[in-house]
Amino acid sequence: TFLQDIPKIAWEYKLGNRSALEWILDQYKEKKPKDQTIAERFNNYRFADYKETVIDLLQRVCTVSVETMKIIEAMKH
């Protein structure tokens, strides 16, 4: 899955030390547990199963990020 045309300013809205978009991408990526038993028994998350939901969330957070940065910029003047 590729995401494109994300405005640069959307990456500037930070939650702590990461952008809101980075936070979502990290939370929803597929992770492989190092413990083989855990990986086999409990690791049943597949990004493909939630792809449309995550993309919708990314779109909404991108909009909020851009609009928030516009407000922050306007407050500086």
Image: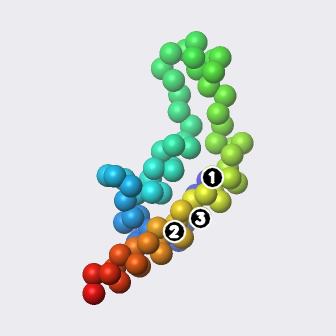
| Tag shown at residue 59 | 3
Q: Secondary structure at mark 1?
A: helix
Residue 14 in sight: yes
Q: Residue at x 54, y 62 (%)?
A: 61
Q: Position of residue 8 (x, y in %)?
A: 41, 71
Q: Position of residue 17 (x, y in %)?
A: 32, 52
At label 1, counting other C-alpha atoms closer than 10 Å, the crowd grade (few under 14, some 14-19, many 20 or more) is: some
Q: Nearer the viewer, residue 11 or 73?
A: 73
The image quadrant of residue 69 is bottom left
| Tag shown at residue 64 | 2
Provide the residue designation for mark 1.
Answer: 54
Q: Nearer the viewer, mark 1 or mark 2?
A: 2
Mark 1 vs mark 3, CA separation in Å: 9 Å
Whichever of callouts 1 and 3 sits on the residue coming sooner in the sequence is 1
Q: Nearer the viewer, mark 2 or mark 3?
A: 2
Amino acid type for the residue under numbered disc 2: Val
Q: Residue at x 68, y 53 (%)?
A: 53
User: Is 51 displayed left or right of 29 in the figure?
Assistant: right
User: Is 77 displayed left or right of 38 in the figure?
Assistant: left
